[in-house]
Image (spheres, rainbow, N blue to C red):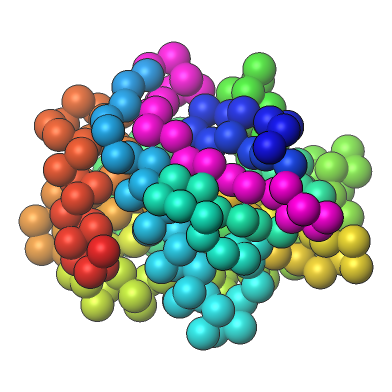
Amino acid sequence: MKLIYEGKAKKIYDFEPGLVVMEFKDSLTAFNAQKKGSFQGKGALNLKFSNQIFSLLSQKNIPHHFVRSLNESQIVVKKLKMLPVEVVVRNFVAGSLAARLGIPEGQKVKNPIVEFYLKNDALSDPLLTENQILALDILSLEQLNKCTEMALKINQVLVSYFLSLGVKLIDFKVELGMDESGQYYLADEISPDSCRLWDQTTHAKLDKDVFRRDLGSVEQAYLEIAKRMGL
């Protein structure tokens, strides 16, 4: 297969018409790849996390790009035109939101916050306002509304699911794409790489923040989530 893209955590290969193969790497990065690490089997774990979430979302009629698994580190997905933004949904204050506003982490927000970030590594993925998105023609109003709608639907499903595992979904990031007919799909992955997950009782972090902040074994954190998900 021909490699057509390699990012910090995944490789994308050309496959069949309308399809590509997404390979999950064992690498870990933080702070726009300024901090790097890895652990063996991390890619396979993230594939399992994502596939289980994709299956859950299918039951709720939320479209996603997953087609089938090839092996423990590669899946076949729909070939999409990716939207140039990352969409973040926040249920609690944490991370950059806490830093920007000076609010302690862990405070629950009144309603889920939807934020947009420009996908640009050179600029460290800057935060965008909706006005900027429309004025600069980064997304159309229809695309902006669809991204918000889908992100909130995904959030509703995931909040309930993770609570059933004794986990708070603090926030998460998604990427969306469109096929040739204009249908919108969830793309990329949903895993502890892209979600903040805290134990509901102890507030122990069970996600990539363990690596970002040197809080212990990130591998053990991921394995704990895998155990709770029955993987």
* Residue 120 location, quadrant: top right
At a point 20% along the width and 39% down the height, the residue shown is: 219
Question: Which residue is painted at 54% across and 84% down in the image?
Answer: 60
Q: What residue is drawn where x is 39% and y is 41%?
A: 43
Coordinates of residue 40 in the picture (x, y in percent): 27, 33
Residue 33 in view (yes/no): yes
- Residue 13: horizontal and vertical position, in percent? 67, 39
- Whether residue 86 is in magenta: the answer is no
Magenta-tinted stretch: 15-35
Examine the rendered structure and indicate whether residue 138 appears above or below residue 140. Answer: above
Q: Is residue 173 left or right of residue 41?
A: right
State whether residue 173 appears in this view: no
> On the picture, is 9 further left or further right than 192?
right
Task: Decide which of 19, 213 is in the foreground and name it.
Answer: 19
Q: Which quarter of the image is occupied by the C terminus?
A: bottom left
Residue 212 is drawn in which quadrant? top left
Q: Residue furthest left?
A: 202
Q: Quadrant of the N terminus?
A: top right
For residue 142, side relative to residue 110 (left or right): right
- Quarter assignment of residue 159: bottom left
Give the x, y percent position of residue 28: 37, 29
Q: Is residue 56 above or below residue 155?
A: below
Q: Is residue 75 left or right of residue 146?
A: left
In the displayed structure, 138 sits above or below 225; it is: above
